[in-house]
Every structure is written in C-alpha cells, then in structure tokens.
Amino acid sequence: MSQNESTTHHDSSAPLEQVEIERKYSVGEELPLPELSGVGRAAGTPVESAVVVEPFPLEAVYFDTAEGALARQRIALRRRRGGHDEGWHVKLPAVEGRTELQWPLGDDDDTVPPEVLAPVRVHVRDHPLSPLAQLSTTRRVTNLLDASGDLVVEIADDTVSATDAREGTVRLWREWEVELGPAAPATPEGRVALLDEIEARLLAVGAAVSPSVSKLAQAVGRTGLGSPTTAPSAKAVAKGSASAAAARVLDGVAELVARVVALDPAVRADRPDSVHQLRTTVRRLRNVLTTHRHLFDPIALDEVRDALSRFGAVLGETRDLEVRAEWAEFSLDELESDRGIDDPDARRRLVDATRAEHDEAHARLVSSMTAPVYYRLLDALDEFAGGSSIAPDAPRQPKKEARRTLRKVGKRALARSVKEREARRVLGPDIVAAAGALGALHDSRKAARRLRHAAEFATSGAGAVLGDHAEAVGDAAEELQDALGWHRDASLFAEYVLLTARRAEAAGEGSFTYGVLYQRSLDQARRALSMAEDARRTLKSTL
C-alpha cells in the first residue's frame, strides 16, 4: 500500500517512500488465478473489476556485504530494471509490512549510489557491497479495482529464475504476490480482513503460503532474512558466570546502542529533531557507562567513553546552531506579535545566517559519520554491549547495585548544585557574565543530567530494576537540568545578540531590535535561575 512522501526537507535526491503490505504464495506452473471480483465487501472496499496487464520482464540484483550485514537486519537493497518502479530500492522492516525507499537509476548502475547507501550506511559501515543474488522475473499483473477504478489490490503472478551470486546455485519457482494498493482499507483490521479473504480464495484453488518471506530469501535458499540464530542477551551470557548487575546494565546499553543505529539515517537526512535525539542518546550512553564504570574493564570502557565524547562534540556543534536559530526565530516572532516590530535585517543576521552556519555544520557532521573513526565507534559499541568487558570482580545484585549508584550520583549532583544567591553574586546584574562565570552552573547542569539519566536508566527499559522513589529522583533532576539549560540558552543567546548588534551598527543598521532582544534574554535568564533554585530544593528533599 503506497503512502508517498518526501523523506527530507534538504536533499533534492530524497527517495520516494511508500509502505509495502503484501503476502506471497507458492503455486504450480499451470495454476490459474481464481475469480476475485466481490472480495473486500466485509472490509468496506469491494472489488468491482479486474484488469489484466500484459506480461513484462524484471531484472534485479540484490547487494550485501560479505558478512550479510543487511540481511541480518532484514533489509534488502536492490537495483531493478523493468516495470513502473525501475530503479534502486531499499526495503526496511516496519510495524506493518515494509518501508520501501526508491531512487531512479543513474549513469553508473553497477555501483550503489551514495544516496541509496545513506539509509543503511550505519549497518554497512565501511565494508564493500557486492551482488548477493540476481533475479530474472516474468511478471503478469492483475489489478483489482473498486467502483471508482482505484487500485485496491495488485496481484503479481511471477515466474522467477534466481541465481545465488555467492554460491552459484540457480533456483526456479512461481509465486503469487498480493500487494495492497492506495484504495485498500484505511485500518489495520480492514487490511488484514481483505488479505485473509483473498488468501482463502487462493488457497482454495491450490496455492500455498510461501515458506519464504521474500524473493531474496528464496534466492539464497532461506525462509527469511535476519540472523539464522538469535544471539543471547548479555544477561543470559552473564548468568551464573559473571555479574548479574553488569548484565542488567549491558542489556540497557544494548538498547541505547540500538537507538543510535536507528537514529543514524535520520541524522544523515537532517530530519527534524534527529540531531537532538542522537546527541541525547550519546550523552545517555556516556553517562550510563560513567556511573557504572566499576562494573567493567576500565581500559575498554574509557575507550568507548572517549569516542562517544568526541562524537558528541561534533553533534553538539550542529545542535547548538539549531537551538540558536530556534531562539532567534521565536524571539523575533514574539517581538513582532507583542510590539509590532518587524526587522528584516535582524532576522537575516540572527536567523538566516545561523541557519546557513547550521547547514555547513551538518555537512561536517555527515562527513564525520562517513569516516572510519565513526564506524569503529559503532563496532566498539556492538562489542561492548555484547558483554566482552565485564570486570571479573563486579558485584552481582542488580537492584542493590542500582540503588548504590543512584545514591552516589545523587549526592554528587546535589553537591555541585549552585544556590541562586551564589549564582547571582557571581554573575552580577546582567545574569549572563563571561563564559568562565557560567562554568559552575554548567557543571551543576551536567551533574543533574547524569543523575536524571541514571534514574531513568534504572526505572525504564531493559535496565529497569528500581521503582517510584528512583523515578521521583529522576523527575526532580530533570527539572533542575531544564531550568539550568534554559538559563544557559538565554545567556548564550544574549551574548550572540550583543555580538551581532555590533556588526549591525558597523554596517549602518539599526540596533533597537537587538537591545530589546538582549533585555528579554536577561529577563528569561533571571526567571530560569529562580526556577533552578526551586528545583534544587525539590531535589534535595527527594534525595
């Protein structure tokens, strides 16, 4: 079922994206397709007519690494010639069916283009791709249409000759492929009902549910893609022979590593909020490893932490510019709404120029994510999450260890928290001061964030072992982190406004807008400090 949409707002080479929902059936050489008019009435989308399309050939080559990195993730990457969707295709697992990305063929059809590789680069990394299977198909299509002539279901009758490119084995088969069209039922229940009704008719004439989930799987002699066996969790590996506490942490680490992998394609495409989410996940990973460092080999742990820190810094450059642009646009919009002040020159300098800086920073980020150092970070995370670095003397009791860690991190966060009166004394009347004076507040924010991450890690997801009290600690730490973050963002924006105002004055432009924005930023910084003090008291009482 096609749901076309652009996948990025920046890249002109963005693919066509659709959701593919289909079922496959094995059939004999001479088996005719049964009468299907009238199906779908119970689902509310009755088929009124069937249109048969003249047979046409399809040629497809599927690519993967020598180790099967894409197949392990149930991903297919192919180049297809022939048919209405000729081009490069990437098929990804989805909640319902599969997500299919499509690009047109280019000048060099023997090499996977960079834009096709980008959504799966996090799995392929710097390993070369080579043909996995080659398929030649003769396709006969029957389109099932509703009363308006819209496509409800496409049934492809395929005769396939497939060659396993790695082993040279040739396999022949015939199958029916039933794929939902744009006029299929709008609800999952309706789609299942329609497919079930069609399936009943196909099975009644002698078809059988295909043992393979895809042509690629059948071409290489398998029933499905993915790992042949499921790797045991870190907890299972550690049980009885190592620290159960470390195994619990590693299960949570594996969950965070999976999140990094899932966000990688969105960051490359510069999807909204993706850089922020990846930066947050990287910070969570680093904080979890820091707070639980005594459970693991210190050398292996520090190598991963340092690599995460370097990558986080690159993410931070892009994210900080996102925040600045958002602050500037919101502040100017608010000024125009409140006081009717519209200053195109200020908008050009504060918003447009920052966005241009952001685009340059994002290009550097993507470049860093297509370099060996990034791929080795991913390799190291995979290895660490697999349980290779558990310390031999690590404690065994997960709940006791989690409580002890949370108390330790909580005391440190409270010790580093800065009281409002102390902050105002150091910062002075402007509240923003120089970067050095903001250091203590920034350290307080980082300590609060680490406590929040420790509490959330211990109360949600695969690493969860604690309950309501730890959750309350995490909520209090989040309030302190957010208030201090608001102060920092307001302070940094105020400094940027002053710097930009000087440049505007030197160019002969007015400075009134900048003065108003600066004062409003100071007011926000003051309110943020007051909120931080309330949050600090709450955290103290919660701990």
Image: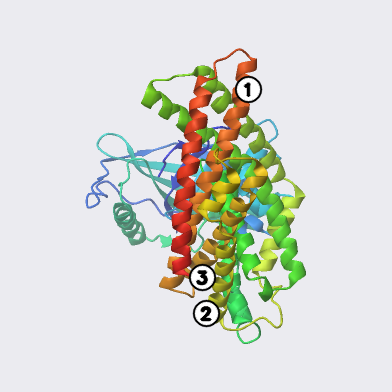
Q: CA distance from mark 2 to mark 3?
A: 9 Å
Q: CA distance from mark 1 to mark 3?
A: 49 Å
Element under disc 2: helix
Which badge, 2 or 1, comes first in the chain's sequence?
2
Do the CB atoms of the residues marked 1 and 3 lie less than 8 Å apart?
no
Q: Position of residue 434 (x, y in %)?
A: 65, 40
From the image, tell me which residue sits under label 3: 458
> In the image, what residue occupies the spot 44% across and 51% down?
531
What sort of colour scheme is used for the picture?
A: rainbow
> In the image, what residue occupies the spot 48% across and 53% down?
532
> In the image, what residue occupies the spot 54% across and 62% down?
453
Evaluate whether residue 35 shows in this view.
yes
From the image, tell me which residue sits under label 2: 399
**Crowd around label 3: few <14 · some 14–19 · many ≥20 (10 Å):** many
Q: Looking at this view, is 267 or 273 the one in front?
A: 273
From the image, tell me which residue sits under label 1: 502
Q: CA distance from mark 2 to mark 1?
A: 56 Å
Residue type at mark 2 is Lys
Q: Is residue 223 left or right of residue 2?
A: right
Q: Is residue 532 left or right of residue 118?
A: left
From the image, which quarter does the N terminus lie in? top left
Q: Looking at this view, is 326 or 272 the one in front?
A: 326
Q: Position of residue 393 (x, y in %)?
A: 70, 83
Element under disc 3: helix
The relative height of residue 435 versus residue 499 in the rendered view (above or below) is below
